[in-house]
Amino acid sequence: MKQLTKTLPVALLTAAAFPAIGHASTPALEEQLAELQHFQVIAHRGASGHAPESTMAAFEMAHEWDVDYLELDAQLSSDGEVVVFHDDTIDRTSDGEGAINDYTLEELKALDTGTWFNEANPDSASDDFAGAKMLTLDELFERFGHDARYYIETKSPQLNPGLEEALVEKLEEHDMIENGRVLVQSFEQDSLLKVQELNDDVPLIQLVWYYPSEEDNSKLVEWTNVTPGTSEITDEDFQAVADYAVGIGTNYLYDGQPVIDADFIQQAQENGLPVHVYTINETEEMERLMDMGVNGLFTNYPDRLLELVE
């Protein structure tokens, strides 16, 4: 794993800023958490700007570039297998249709999850992408093992009952937690707390999404009400998240307008929460957010981001 040069502001480098590290149960896990003080390149669904999202081709490309994390979404097939897929329905990125949870793993494996990319992105199309198969989490872990780190979202947990149990079982089976190989993220606080109950060594990232209130569009609110809007957020609000999470993942823009600023980033960091921003694909925005002091970026184009941090 490369040592990237972009580091956190001094305010985050105090002992008080690392409450979660004190709970690390192994040196490898402690090392992983400590490395969150350095800038993280997070390959969103793999190198999904260059290859079909969430396919082995996209993850292979990102891994070859030596990104810090392979980001992915975990869901369940109808027969309880953990699969790597983003949407609640299979229509957009496969040749099937309907809810992903209505299909067995065997049925999902029969889908073509690559040809759509060639049709939508002729400049990046490859014959190798056609016929790409949906991955299981086991397959991803078996391919990259402990040579990669994984940033896994519990996707739509209300549609995937039992997902947290199945995910933690896989993480433990592949020794990902104690070896410092995984972060688990979710917009749903209850899902994160369920993961924590199952194994309190799993490092958690609370995702948030800020947007203008329908009642007063001059005021921002957060999608699941896990925090107040950014203009009203307090140290206590950040500390409440830091009680169970080791970081926060947030949007930067809504409808082209910023919803966070450097003050938000600094305040989160001062309360023990490194800030990762999704999903940033343009170099100018990458540079702007790095200058603001963010601790990592999710991107479909990790090659662009790596050029800025190497």
Image (cartoon, rainbow, N blue to C red):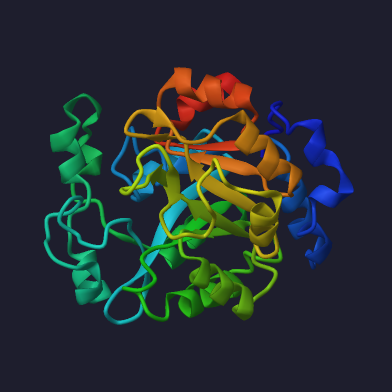
Which residue occupies the extreme right position in the image?
15
Please report the residue visible at 75 percent of the width from the left and 43 percent of the height from the top.
Answer: 270
Task: Indicate the position of residue 303 as horizontal and vertical percent values.
Answer: 47, 27
In the displayed structure image, the side of residue 173 where residue 161 appears, left or right: left
**Quarter placement of the N terminus:** top right
Task: Indicate the position of residue 266 as horizontal and vertical percent values.
Answer: 69, 36
Which residue occupies the extreme front position in the image?
216
Above or below, comparing residue 243 to residue 119 in the picture: below
Above or below, comparing residue 238 to residue 308 in the picture: below
Above or below, comparing residue 256 to residue 207 in the picture: above
Please report the residue visible at 23 percent of the width from the left and 67 percent of the height from the top.
Answer: 100
- Please state which of residues 139 and 54 is positioned toward the viewer in this rendering: 54
Above or below, comparing residue 175 to residue 125 in the picture: below
Location of residue 253 (image quadrant): top left
Q: Would residue 15 be visible to someone looking at this image?
A: yes
Q: Would residue 103 be visible to someone looking at this image?
A: no
In the displayed structure image, the side of residue 160 where residue 297 appears, left or right: right
Task: Indicate the position of residue 80 as horizontal and vertical percent values.
Answer: 35, 80
In the displayed structure image, the side of residue 150 where residue 199 appears, left or right: right
Task: Indicate the position of residue 284 as horizontal and vertical percent values.
Answer: 46, 17
- Please state which of residues 197 and 202 is positioned toward the viewer in this rendering: 197
Please report the residue visible at 41 percent of the width from the left and 55 percent of the height from the top.
Answer: 223
Please report the residue visible at 26 percent of the width from the left and 62 percent of the height from the top.
Answer: 88
Which residue occupies the extreme top position in the image?
284
**Quarter placement of the C terminus:** top right
Tell me how many marks there are.
0
In the displayed structure image, the side of residue 299 where residue 124 appears, left or right: left
